[in-house]
Each structure stands twice: as structure tokens, then as C-alpha cells.
Image (tube, rainbow, N blue to C red):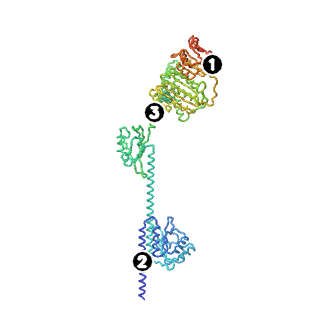
Amino acid sequence: MPDRALDAQAFSETIRLRHAEARHRIVADITTILLDYVGPDEVEPLRRIVEKVTAALGDWCAFSLVGDDGILRQVAAYHPDVRQRELAVLVNQLVPPRQWDAGPEATNVLVQRRPLVFEEISDEMLRAGLPSDEAFAAMKEIGLASAILAPLLDGQKPLGTVILASAGRGGRRYTRDDVDFVVAIADRAALAVRNARLVQKLAEERDRLDRARAQAEERAAQMLAVFQADPNGIALFDANGVLRFVSPRVAELFGTNLEGFLGKHHDEAFRVDLRGDGNNEELMLQMRSIFADREHPSTDEFLVRKTNRWIRRSSTPVRSESGAYLGRMFVYMDVTAEKQLDRERSEFLTVAAHELRTPLTPLSMYLQGIERRLARGLPIEPELVVKARRQVGRLSRLVEDLLDVSRLESGRLTLSRDRVALDQIVSEVVSDFRAAAPQHEIVLRRPTRGVQAMGDRERLEQVVVNLVQNAIKYSPQGGRVEVSVERNGSQARVTVTDEGIGIPKDEQRHIFERFFRAQNATTRNYGGLGIGLYVSNEIVERHGGAFEVVSEPGKGTTFGFTIPLDESEPALEPGRARILVVDDDRAMLDATSSVLRDWGYAVDEAGDGETALRLLRAAKPDLMLVDLMMPVMDGWALVVRMRQDGLAEAVPLVVFSADSEANAHAKDLNAAAALRKPFSLDELQSVLGRLLPGTPPS
Ligand code: ADP
């Protein structure tokens, strides 16, 4: 029956064509699906293919992909039958995923890199591919009839696999004809996976760029904030020499608003006379040469007239990481204080050299004199040696002063802590100066009771010497210098008042600074290093005390300091009487006072009548010793004034004079006793014993 045979052949050919047509349609649909999806998810297109294929063929379709770890995992699988799907899930659980190249090579499509057709699947094949009986049982229930496996490749690189399988009773047997179809699906799927990965990579790249840009912007913002806050002014020019950034501090330093300079070339920007010295042409040329050199940093200094600030300008070329020239950064630093310090240092050296030369010149002269006399065999006058020694003394004091500054600065000035009688120190200093400064009247005021403090005797004496020395030095016309030591609450207080040139108000607060010398001293050529008060103040502060100054130019100055009294001071000595001594003869005044103090009396001294009146007003003495023969206001006039002013009521008066009429004068003045100069200490002692009976001299 050839016809029937022919029919059957024609029929099967028709079926085959229909099949082929249906598969073409599926492939075309898949192509459309893939074109529709442009996203980063590599599984999504595979899922859609699975859906399409299973819907059209009713067979198993599953995709697996090779992960970064090289393991092949199923990512999309479907079968229209629910039980089939359950079994597939079970098999998946029982068969752990493996490396893509594991297992027998002959049946591994990724190793073979070509599709494989399993027209019929035998139990042996299943057992060989499955690890357990359970898995085998599940597989058996699925009932795989036939399968085609194809690799998903990216060139030589394995991406994954696709499997098309028929299962169950009546499952189709695939033949070589079906391979083209599966390969077409595999090729499209591989393309879809590659596309999705590309999209993924692009998205990552874009994110990375976005992050990098955000980071760069943040860094730039931080850098600008740092530049803005920098105490130094900062300006940035780009590679073309155009100003791109300028911090507000630059404007402050130049005293000019620089907003309008941004975006301008340096030639244009520096046409403005920023330094205010009329030399902007020079500045412009300088900038040109700085910008012409793209290799080296630059530094220069200049004064901005407008703000009176010295500025150090440094610039450096700025380069990118790859070394490309990006421009130049300028840093403007205010070095005014540094300059000032430099100036002060060199001024100080000049002054110090001058001060050291002052005693050196006469010293050298005296030594030459001695040398000549020696050469000629003449005797050397002791006077010459004394004078030379005095200059050596001056020199050593200067050197000591300088050393004190260095000791203070290095913290090496140590103070001893002993019990010191401040009143005695002051009194001794005063009597030393009385001898040395005859044109000045130095008045001392001290309380009856001793003033004790804890401290360094020598250093405190140094402070008092310094104050009295300054008082004398800065009152060149002579006059009175009043030195007082007193108690003020828990403090001992020493003040020295002069009638000298005074210190201008605005300079008074600097007076204790190291090397500071007020205008009045420098313009009038008083020698000095500006060290004494600095050292004195430090000494007093280290004793826990403080300095004060009151001064009026042309009228005079009072320097005072306080230090804490010694707490452990013994109780008041009973019955120390106070005696006021008035004598214009300095030597006499000194001698009398010191004897009286030795005997335990408190003594106020006055070199003239006016001072005596002032002292009387301040504190009433227990006895007065008055010299009758004094210039200006003599003893007579003083006593009369005293009585008129009711100042010395009931104060016994002892007068002394050099003439033989002393006793008669005493009577005339209603004085308690008279002493004729020169009197003996015995005479003085007996008069005092009589007039101050409760306080016999020791
Ligand atoms: P020196 O006297 O060596 O210059 P000091 O430290 O003792 O240094 O004093 C500092 C400055 O204070 C002096 O240069 C002077 O200008 C001023 N000064 C100090 N004492 C007096 C004073 N009694 N009267 C006026 N000016 C004074």
C-alpha cells in the first residue's frame, strides 16, 4: 500500500513542519521578550523564557547559572504539572549543586561545550548522575523520558545550562531535530544573561562614579572650609594664572575687598596697588616671574601700608597625582609680631652694648692711668683703684641683671625662704642711697613694729634698691624721694615716691615688660636696659605679691609692692616708742636714727621742716629731736608751726644745736631738753631715759 505509506510520510512531514514552525514562533517570541527586558536582573529573562517554553510545549524547561564561586545552581525551572514541580524541588534538595565541571565529562555540556541529546533516559544513566536512592526514587517518579541539554556560553566562558526535558507517560522523545531549537534558546538566554550583567556593571560603574564625585565634592568643600578658617590668608590660581579662590583673611591682611578679583588673571588682579606703596608695577612683574616658574616655591615679605602689617607670602606650584600642573597656591602669613621682635632684639643689643661700654670706657681709662704710673715708677693713688673698682662693680651689676633675665626665662631663678625684716632691708637701702645721692632728700617711713615676711632677703633688697635707684635716676632735678614700709592687713607694703619725670599713662601698663623702656627714658638718654622692673616684678610675684604704679608725667611716680606678712610673726613688742628726728645734715640724721633704732626705738626721719610737718600729721611720735639750725624752715619756725597747727601737743621736744646757747634756746621754745652738738651717746641716752621713762633703751 504505497499510497498509505506515502500518506503517512506526508503526514509525518507535515507534523514535523508544524513542529518546526511552532518552535520558530517560540524562538521569535523569546527574542521579543528579551528585547523587551533591559535590566540588571540576569534571572528575570530566563524566568520569562521558561514560562514561554513550558506554556508552549508542556515540557520541563530549566536554567542553571554558574556563580562567582564556580558552582552551577538552578535559577529558573518550571513544569505545568504541580506534582512534577514538587518532585523537582525535592530532587533539588537531595542533589547538592556542584562545580560546573564536576561529574562525568561525557555528559557535561559545559565541559563538552556542545548540546547533548538524551533520546532515552535509562535507569543506569539516572543512577550514575544521582547521589542517593531517595533522589533516584524522586527522579524515577518524575519519569524523565528524553532530554536535551545545551550550554550557555560567553565565548569560551561557561555561563550556565538549559535543559528541555519531557517526562511522564507519553513524554516525547527528542531527536537531533530538536537540538537546533534548544541551541537557539540557549544562545538567546546566554545573550540575555550577558546583557543583564553588562547593565549591572554599568549601573555599578555609574554608582561608583557618583560616589567618587560626591566624595570629591565633599573633599573640596572641606578643603575650602579649612582654607577659609586658616589664620593665614590663602589664594589659589589655576594653571592659566586666574584667581579661583581667595580666603577672607587675605582681604583682612590687605585691608581691601577682594571679591571682584575672583576669575581674574593675576596680571589684571595685581594692577591694583594692594601694598599701598605705589610699586604695583613691580608687584605685577614679580607675580609674572613667580607664575613663569612652574617648578619652585617662592617666598617674599612686604609691608602693607594700609593695614600696617608685615606679610610673608609663600607660594607653591600645585600638581595633580599624575603630576599635571594645576596652578599655584599662595599663603599669606602675618609676621608683624615677628618683625617687631626682631627689631626689639636688635635695639636691645644696641642698648646693651652701649650700657656695657659706659663703665668699660672709664675703667679702661683708669687702668691706662695706673699702667702709665707703673711705667714711670710713680706711686698709684688709691683713689684711682677705688674708681676703677666702682666701674667693675657697675659692670658686674649689668651682667648680673642680664643673667637674671636669662635665669627667669629658663626657670633657674630660685628664691630662698627665710624670715626677713622688710623694714630693716628698706632702712638699710635708704641709708646707702642717702650717702650716694646728695641732691635728693630721701625720707624713710616705717612703723614702730617690725615688718616681717618670708622670702629671699637678697632678692627683696634688689627690688627696693631698684625702685630707689629709679626714683633717683628719673628725678634728675633732685627733690624728695619718700620710701615707706608699712603693714596693710595681711600684707607688707613698700612704696617709693619721687617727684621726677613720671611715666605717660599709655606706657604704664608695659612698664614691667622685659626690655621695655618708656619714651621719657629713651628720648632723654637715660641709660638702662629695661630689665630692673621686669626682674623686680617677677621676684615680687614669686613671693606671692604684686606691684602697682601711679604716675603723672612731670609730677612724679609712686611704685609700690606688697608681699604677704609672715603669719608666724610674734606678738607686738610692748612699749616701743616712736621718735621723730629732724635734721638737715644728712650724716647726722643717719647716724642719730641708726643709733636710736639700735636701741629699739621706731624712728621717722625728716631732712627739713616741711617733711617733719607731714610726718607729724601722719603719725604722732612719742618724742621729737629737732635741729634748730636748718635752712628754709629752721627749727624755730618748725616748732612754731607745729604748735600753731596743734600737731605736737604733749610730745616732749628735744632741741639740739651747735651753738653754746642751746639750753637758752630750749627754754625759749619750751623744750623738754637740749643737746649741744657734738653730744655723746651717754648724754642722748640719759635725756631719752628721762623723757621716755617706760621705755629704757637697751
Ligand atoms: P631701666 O631703668 O634700666 O630702663 P627699668 O626696668 O628699671 O629699666 O625701668 C623700665 C622703664 O620704666 C624705664 O626705662 C623708665 O622709662 C621707666 N621708669 C622706671 N622707674 C621710673 C620712675 N621712677 N620714673 C619715671 N620712669 C620710670
Residue 675 found in image quarter: top right
Calculate the distance from the C-alpha at mark 1 to the C-alpha at mark 3. 62 Å
Q: Can I make out residue 306 in this image?
A: yes
Helix, strand or loop at disc 1?
A: loop
Q: Residue 76, percent across and down? A: 49, 70
Q: Can I make out residue 331 in this image?
A: no
Calculate the distance from the C-alpha at mark 1 to the C-alpha at mark 2. 151 Å
Q: Which mark is residue 692?
A: 1
Q: Residue 636, percent across and down? A: 54, 15
22 is higher (above) or lower (below) than 661? below
Amino acid found under the numbered disc labelled 3: Ser
Front one among 603 and 323: 603
Q: Residue 640, percent across and down? A: 54, 16
686 is higher (above) or lower (below) than 174? above
For label 1, the crowd category at 10 Å Cα-Cα, with few meaning under 14, some 14 to 19 and many 20 or more, is: some
Asked if labels 2 and 3 touch by Cβ distance under 8 angstroms, the answer is no
For label 2, the crowd category at 10 Å Cα-Cα, with few meaning under 14, some 14 to 19 and many 20 or more, is: some
**Ligand 1 closer than 8 Å to label 3 CB:** no
217 is higher (above) or lower (below) than 284? below
User: Can you identify the residue that label 2 sits on?
Assistant: 20
- The outermost residue toward the bottom is 1
Helix, strand or loop at disc 3?
A: helix
